[in-house]
């Protein structure tokens, strides 16, 4: 749970009211203004979405907010580098690139790599250039899998949740969900950039988890008018 000093918020002009992931915009605004953040050794019992539809909607909003933050803060790239410094600006751009293009393009790259491994020359290169490319792609695939699984396993061990390690086999499904949400976010960014799909919390406390209606991944249950949203 973030906490802010009101003086700091006034200094940066608060946050973008049209950004559906306001903490992303606010964090970058604070960094560009020279403020620093600290992490307290505490824990939160915030409830995660209990239904698949709610989870996709939440991640859709997050992705759309990151896209909005990227577009707004990169309208003047040189100013971004001046405010943050080259090192931090490159880190921010790399974070946005990996966080957005990964879910958008990941399934296609994984499918192509699988096809090349089965039917292509990925595992049976001949020419030196093919050997170099095959080695690079295999190393990237292995390193990516390790960087994805190892932090989760370490976190589960530290929190005493090792009994749930078998749940890691569902990571491919999780990645597919992120891809659906990312493409849905890109669609909404073009059609309804300011629409906010709120995540319902407190279901566990009430002891009730309501099943959501079966809707398509590009369809929302709410249909506010774009003109009303843009002028809000």
Image: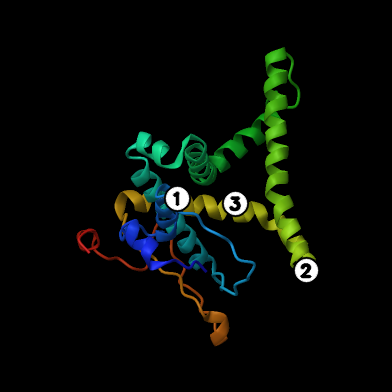
- 226 or 162, which lies in front? 162
Instruction: Examine the image and state in which quarter residue 133 appears.
Output: top right
Q: Are dots 2 and 1 in contact, CB under 8 Å?
A: no
* Residues at circles 3 and 1 in contact by the CB criterion of under 8 Å: no
Could you give the CA–CA distance between mark 2 and mark 1, rounded to whole angstroms? Answer: 34 Å
- The disc placed on residue 190 is none
SS at badge 3: helix
Q: CA distance from mark 3 to mark 1?
A: 30 Å
Q: CA distance from mark 2 to mark 3?
A: 24 Å
Mark 1 neighbour density, 10 Å: few (under 14) some (14–19) many (20 or more): some
Q: Residue at x 48, y 68 (%)?
A: 3
Q: Residue at x 76, y 68 (%)?
A: 161
Q: Quadrant of residue 39?
A: bottom right
Q: From the viewer's side, name the closer residue of 212 and 167.
A: 167
Badge 3, how many Cα within 10 Å: few under 14, some, many 20+?
A: some
Where in the figure is residue 179, as x and y percent of width and height? 52, 49
Q: Is residue 217 visible?
A: no
Kindly identify the residue that appears in the image at 21 percent across and 63 percent down.
228
Q: Which mark is residue 160?
A: 2
Instruction: Please tell me whether mark 1 sits on a helix, a strand or a loop.
Output: helix
Percent across and percent down for residue 58 are 47, 63
**Residue 171 or 112: which is nearer the viewer?**
171
Residue 82 rendering spot, x and y as whole percentages: 40, 37
x 64%, y 33%: residue: 113
Q: Which residue is mark 3?
A: 175
Report crowding for label 2: few under 14, some 14 to 19, many 20 or more residues within 10 A (C-alpha): few
Residue 166 appears left or right of 79: right
Q: Quadrant of the C terminus?
A: bottom left
- Give the vertical position of 124 relative to 31 (above or below): above
Q: Nearer the viewer, mark 3 or mark 1?
A: 1
**Residue 2, image x and y in percent?**
49, 66
């Amino acid at each position: 749970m973030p906490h802010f000093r009101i003086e700091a918020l006034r200094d940066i002009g608060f946050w973008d009211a049209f950004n559906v992931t306001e903490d992303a915009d606010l964090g970058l605004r604070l960094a560009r203004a020279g403020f620093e953040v600290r992490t307290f050794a505490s824990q939160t019992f915030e409830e995660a979405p209990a239904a698949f539809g709610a989870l996709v909607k939440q991640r859709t909003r997050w992705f759309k907010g990151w896209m909005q933050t990227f577009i707004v803060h990169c309208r003047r790239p040189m100013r971004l580098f001046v405010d943050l410094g080259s090192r931090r600006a490159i880190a921010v751009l790399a974070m946005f690139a990996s966080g957005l293009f990964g879910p958008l393009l990941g399934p296609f790259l994984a499918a192509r790599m699988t096809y090349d491994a089965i039917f292509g020359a990925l595992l049976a290169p001949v020419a030196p250039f093919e050997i170099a490319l095959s080695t690079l792609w295999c190393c990237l695939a292995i390193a990516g899998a390790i960087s994805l699984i190892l932090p989760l396993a370490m976190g589960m061990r530290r929190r005493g949740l090792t009994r749930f390690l078998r749940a890691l086999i569902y990571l491919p499904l999780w990645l597919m969900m992120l891809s659906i949400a990312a493409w849905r976010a890109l669609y909404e960014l073009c059609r309804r950039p300011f629409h906010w799909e709120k995540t319902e919390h407190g279901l566990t406390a009430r002891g009730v988890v309501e099943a959501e209606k079966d809707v398509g991944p590009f369809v929302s249950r709410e249909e506010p008018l774009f003109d009303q949203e843009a002028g809000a």
